[in-house]
Amino acid sequence: MKRISCLLLIPALLLLLGYGIARGEQKGEQKDFAATIDQDGVQRVVVVGGGYFFNPNHITVKVNVPVELKVTKQPGVVPHDIVMKSPEAGMEFEEELGTDPKVIKFTPTKTGKFPFYCSKKIPLLPSHREKGMEGTIEVAP
């Protein structure tokens, strides 16, 4: 019985990998977004993750102005998250992505370029970040 289960699992994994490769057509494309400050003083950005990409993957915001990232992922079975580890700049979060939007709030406190990425990884395969699922938040004066 275990052998049959494994034999059924292999095609399913290959199908998922093929889906991920096929959806990776946006890998490497830079999608820029420059946030504007809304009337309530907040910079809002919508970020969609999927097939080993974020759109946009280069976001420019102003320093010391609150930011709200509304994050989602494209439909599919491949799990994704969005991670930023820049506490020195007031930006540190790790959030699972789903098809229902989630809002991440922070206020960048330092200018510069700071990476965000998907931390997911299937054993024995490159991580989603290694496959190109990463981006940059550029904090401008």
Image (tube, rainbow, N blue to C red):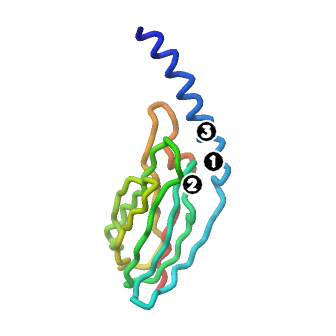
Work out which residue is located at the far front of the displayed protein and give it. Answer: 100
122 sits to left or right of 85:
right
N-terminal label among 3 and 1: 3
| Residue 92 % position (x, y) | 33, 65
Say whether marks 1 and 2 touch (CB < 8 Å).
Answer: yes
Instruction: Describe the element under mark 3 as helix, strand or loop.
Output: helix
Within 10 Å of disc 3 (Cα), the crowding (few <14, some 14-19, many 20+) is: some
Instruction: Describe the element under mark 1 as helix, strand or loop.
Output: helix
User: In terms of image quadrants, where is residue 110?
Assistant: bottom left
**Given the image, on which type of amino acid does mark 1 rest?**
Gly
User: In terms of image quadrants, where is residue 69?
Assistant: bottom left
Work out which residue is located at the far bottom of the displayed protein and give it. Answer: 39
Image height check: is 7 above or below 126? above
Pick the residue in front: 34 or 113. 34
**Given the image, on which type of amino acid does mark 3 rest?**
Tyr
Instruction: Describe the element under mark 2 as helix, strand or loop.
Output: strand
CA distance for labels 2 and 3 = 14 Å
Say whether marks 2 and 3 touch (CB < 8 Å).
Answer: no
N-terminal label among 2 and 3: 3
Q: Nearer the viewer, mark 2 or mark 3?
A: 3
Residue occupying image coordinates x 52% and y 45%: 76
In this figure, which residue is indicated by the disc labeled 3? Answer: 19
12 sits to left or right of 86:
right
In this figure, which residue is indicated by the disc labeled 2? Answer: 53
In this figure, which residue is indicated by the disc labeled 1? Answer: 24
Within 10 Å of disc 2 (Cα), the crowding (few <14, some 14-19, many 20+) is: many
| Residue 131 % position (x, y) | 56, 46
57 sits to left or right of 5:
right
Pick the residue in front: 11 or 106. 11
